[in-house]
Image (tube, helix red, strand yellow):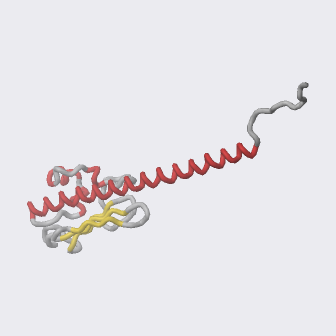
Amino acid sequence: MTSLKRKERGFTIIELLIVIIVIGILATLVITTFSGIQRNARNRTREADINALHSQLEYYYGQNGNYPTLAELNDATWRSTNLKGLDSEALKDPQGSSATLVASPQADAYSYAVTPANCDNGSNGDCTAYVLTATYEGGNTFVKNSLN
């Protein structure tokens, strides 16, 4: 005797929905993890840039007895003459658009503040200390102070 029942092949809607939900959860986990890894890599780049700049500034101080002003550091010609080991890309935040330092900490830019205020290594006195700051994604900061 032959059976009148036919075997149907395929997936039910419930099975398809379960598979779609599982794939969605996995995709969300992968995207979240990947964006966190990228953010951490950019923050490590910020630290490396600030450390490189710090080293060059301390070398300059050892040679000259003062630190450069913000205007001097932002002048490409001055940098190429006085800070030969510094790559100008080290002045640019990974998400910033300009390789220029700013006076106070802000997102997407590195800051360089010298003391005393208004020093110019001339008539207004020598710049005797500085604070370098990089703002992390997420709001925290990485700060490097002069050794003097």
Question: In the displayed image of the protein, which residue is found farthest to the front?
Answer: 1
Q: Quadrant of the C terminus?
A: bottom left
Q: Is residue 24 above or below residue 102?
A: above
Question: In the displayed image of the protein, which residue is found farthest to the bottom?
Answer: 116
Residue 52 in sight from this viewpoint: yes
Q: Quadrant of the N terminus?
A: top right
Q: Quadrant of residue 101?
A: bottom left
The x, y position of residue 20, in whole percent, is 66, 45
Q: How many marks?
A: 0
- Residue at left offset 32%, top offset 54%: 45
- Residue at left offset 21%, top offset 51%: 86
Q: Is residue 116 above or below residue 35?
A: below
Residue 102 in sight from this viewpoint: no
Q: Quadrant of residue 70?
A: bottom left
From the viewer's perspective, tell me whether residue 85 is left or right of residue 31.
left
From the viewer's perspective, tell me whether residue 119 is left or right of residue 15.
left
Q: Is residue 119 above or below residue 50?
A: below
Question: In the displayed image of the protein, which residue is found farthest to the top?
Answer: 1
The x, y position of residue 59, in whole percent, is 13, 59
Q: Nearer the viewer, residue 72 or 99?
A: 99
From the viewer's perspective, tell me whether residue 97 is left or right of residue 86.
right
- Residue at left offset 14%, top offset 54%: 82
Q: Nearer the viewer, residue 39 or 26?
A: 26
The x, y position of residue 92, in whole percent, is 32, 54
- Residue at left offset 15%, top offset 62%: 58
Q: Nearer the viewer, residue 128 or 56?
A: 56
